[in-house]
Image (cartoon, coloured by chain):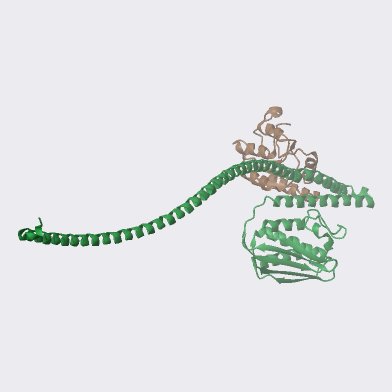
Chain colours: A brown, B green
Amino acid sequence: MENQEIQILLVEDNKSDAALTIRALKKHNLANNLVHLIDGAQAIDFIFGKGEFSSRDPEIKPKVIFLDIKMPKISGLEVLRIIKADERTKRIPVVMMTSSNEERDIMESHQLGVNSYVVKPLGFANFSKTIAELGFYWLAVNNAPRQ
Amino acid sequence: MDKWKNPKLVLVSVNEIDLQNKEKEKRAQELLTANKELVFQNDEKEKRAQELIVANHELVLQNIENEKRAAALTLANADLLRQNAEIKELTLALEAAKQELETAYLEKQRQALVLQAANQELESFSYSVSHDLRAPLRAINGFTEILLEEYIEKLGEDAQYLLGEIIANSKKMGQLIDNLLDFSRLSKQQISFARVDLDLLVRSVTDQLCRLEPEREIQFEFDCPDAGFGDRNMLRQVLVNLVSNALKYTSKKQKTRIQIACHREENNCIFSIRDNGAGFDMMYYDKLFGVFQRLHSSNEFEGTGVGLAIVQKIIAKHGGKVWAQAQVNEGACFYFSLPFSS
């Protein structure tokens, strides 16, 4: 299962947020081949096939990464920096998912080459709609380079 | 023998007498000349004596003068000594003051570091508030909405009402967090000064806010001929907060009347916005601009108590002042001043 095709890589430490995100995606049939990781360190190991994911083929790249910004160990911004600085992974679209519109986070994310920056809406109706639009856009509308 | 009896002898004698007489005459002449000379010399000496007396007098005067001078010099010397002592004292005092200043400077530097640390702490605090307080709210709100949406047939009317309350309150808390963050972000925001056409800004803000309440009949009066000088976005925020307050507190009146004006007063632009709404009790005026302070209950009028605090902070950042006057049920008038040169 580790080397299956992945569509969405969700990196989110908050269980509730992850559950709501996955629920919203499922509701719109966008949660097939979704992988959920709970912190930045796991995300790095997964993307580069290291540590607990050393048997995973890093050539199999997610179509999009939904990355929470505030996580323990390695933050979303650090994960973004590492991904965008590496020739092998810099073309993977990354969507920053955050709770707030902190100007410096928006600034830094774009400086690092983020593909989208989204503030998670408070109400579930809006949240669900936003997540669905994001999933639909990155999985169906956007044309990413062939890997 | 009698010589006079001898003629020869007599002749000789007569000759001699004659000679002697002539000699005497000559002598007398000489004496006369010598006498004249002496008289002259005496005159001369007297003149000299006179001169000496004058000179002496002069010397006495000079002596007195010199003595006076010497006394003055002695005084001046004493003065100099005193001044020297004073200078020494002042130098010591200056040295002490310098030391004190250095200590104060070090203390200031220490305080600046403490402040900087406190600032950093506050910043990470507000960062944490914006992220960590919102996530559980999103969960409360999200799961309640899912429950309401997916299990609605199984829920009684009362349960639906209760879930609706949870959702409304979590949204209100989200609003509170947003407002609190807006307020704390203001402190570090830099002002970019520009000339702002207040009339244009006021009309754009009132248009925008009136569109949110199309059913209301609102009478606006504008009189803003002057331009202000400040940060356009911040001043827009001020106007949005003041106009939406005016709209909010007039919402229970049959007819809403809002007068917006500005005029020049010395080096300030004085802006005013007057409404005929609920007003407030001037007794609680000192709480009016405080953060999270409200003069009306949220059952009466919705609100978080941050709007006017933001107004005051922005105007203070511009070097201006905010004040207000009101009467319960008669309406309120809010003013702010904007200096033309900051």
The C terminus of chain B - image quarter? bottom right
- Residue situated in front as seen by the camera: A62 or A74: A74
Left or right, A98 with respect to B43, comes to right
Please report the residue visible at 68 percent of the width from the left and 56 percent of the height from the top: B317
Left or right, B76 with respect to A59, comes to left
Residue B306 seen in render: yes
The image position of residue B154, as x and y in percent, is: 93, 48
- Residue situated in front as seen by the camera: B35 or B271: B35
- Residue situated in front as seen by the camera: B20 or B339: B20
The N terminus of chain B - image quarter? bottom left
Please report the residue visible at 87 percent of the width from the left and 49 percent of the height from the top: B166
How many numbered circles are shown?
0
| Residue projecting furthest to the left | B8
Residue A147 seen in render: no
- Residue situated in front as seen by the camera: B132 or B155: B132
> Image quadrant of residue A32?
top right
> Image quadrant of residue B315?
bottom right
| Residue projecting furthest to the front | B1
The image position of residue B211, as x and y in percent, is: 76, 65
The image position of residue B249, as x and y in percent, is: 82, 64
Left or right, A45 with respect to B33, comes to right
The image position of residue A114, as x and y in percent, is: 65, 44
Left or right, B305 with respect to B271, comes to right
